[in-house]
Amino acid sequence: MNKHFLHISDYTAEELWDIMNLAKSVKNKFHERENYPHFKNKSLAMIFAKPSARTRVSFETGFEWMGGHALFLGPNDIGIGKREAIKDISRVFSRYNDMIMARLFEHEHIIELAKHSSIPIVNGLTDYNHPCQIMTDIFTVWEHLEDIDNIKIVYMGDGNNIVHSWLHLAMRFPLHFVCCCPKGYEPNKDTVENAKAAGISNIEISHNPADAVKEADMIYTDVWASMGQKEEAETREKIFMPFQVNKKLMNSTGKNTLFMHCLPAERNREVTDEVLEADYSIVFDQAENRLHIQNAIMIKLSESYGK
Ligand code: CP
Ligand code: NVA
């Protein structure tokens, strides 16, 4: 195992399957509220430079269920990279805690945090990627479809951090992944090229929603303006409206198609209320699974790199 969980592509397909299988078993234990004191007397520092509901609550709930203590450090608590150098925070927390989960703006900052840390760092989202989310997403699709080999996943919207993690996953698991976005909002070029070069998956960038969704097993969307881009929301709304996931689009795939969204959703912008509430929408299974996948990730990291 890699020491940190920063990018899905840092792991082999076998390691990613190990995480998924472990998540399945800890999910059952959690549902039974079994005593599972894996992190007894351990602590997790959770650093948030951006807001969060799911990431905060799922990490805190999961770590505490496993017998440990999770500390929440919000945007005004540390001033990471402002009040104090990132490499100093790394070394100080490495003396107090057993693991760090961080949600930061700049991706370089989480790399820097990891570089100087003697304890595992888990990426809870950066401007560049969101690996815990996409491991959760593929786990959720696996639960629903059972066979995920070469399934067609169509992401509608902004070529953002969510897309980069899907592309990293597509470097390890065979998928047909289509990112359908307005021109000028494509994902990072190098990441797309690397994903294609890995030769595992069929990767497409499309600007045509009607074509892109044909035969899709799952359609995914995310907010049009991510955290840190909210001042662009109004301009983006006009550009992205043709990429909205609505009933007409969901009904035009030619097969039964699941709908997913990492949440939080801006209802009736990137997705209509009707789609979010439909039977084929699995967004709450998806949200729940954050807890179980992250528990599995933290257990695996601690087994390899626990103090
Ligand atoms: N999906 C997700 O990461 O949600 P939060 O921003 O609420 O943590
Ligand atoms: N792309 C979104 C994901 C939120 C979970 C953002 O970065 O705000």
Image: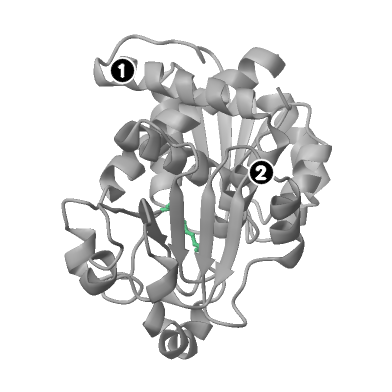
Examine the rendered structure and indicate whether residue 87 appears above or below residue 27: below
The residue positioned 63% from the left and 13% from the top of the image is: 303
Q: Residue at x 47, y 87 (%)?
A: 239
Q: Examine the rendered structure and indicate whether residue 65 appears above or below residue 279.
A: above
What is the quadrant of the C terminus in the image? Answer: top right
Q: Secondary structure at mark 2?
A: loop
- Residue in front for this viewpoint, 74 or 278: 278
What residue is rendered at 27% in x and 55% in y? Answer: 255
Residue 83 is situated, as x and y percent measured from the top left of the image, at 74, 57
Which of the labelled discs sits on residue 9, or is there none? none
* Residue type pointed to by label 2: Met
Mark 2 CB lies closer than 8 A to ligand 2: no
- Measuring from the top left, give residue 302's x and y in whole percent: 62, 18
Is 128 on the left-hand or right-hand side of 33? right
Give the quadrant of the N terminus. top right
Q: Which residue is depicted at the point 54% across and 25% down?
A: 17
Query: Is residue 206 shown above or below 282?
Result: below
Residue 222 shown left or right of residue 144 in the figure: right
To which quarter of the image does residue 185 belong? bottom right
Which sits earlier in the primary sequence, circle 1 or circle 2?
Answer: 1
Q: CA distance from mark 1 to mark 2?
A: 29 Å
Measuring from the top left, give residue 96's x and y in whole percent. Answer: 68, 26
Residue at label 2?
Answer: 171
- Mark drawn on residue 28: 1
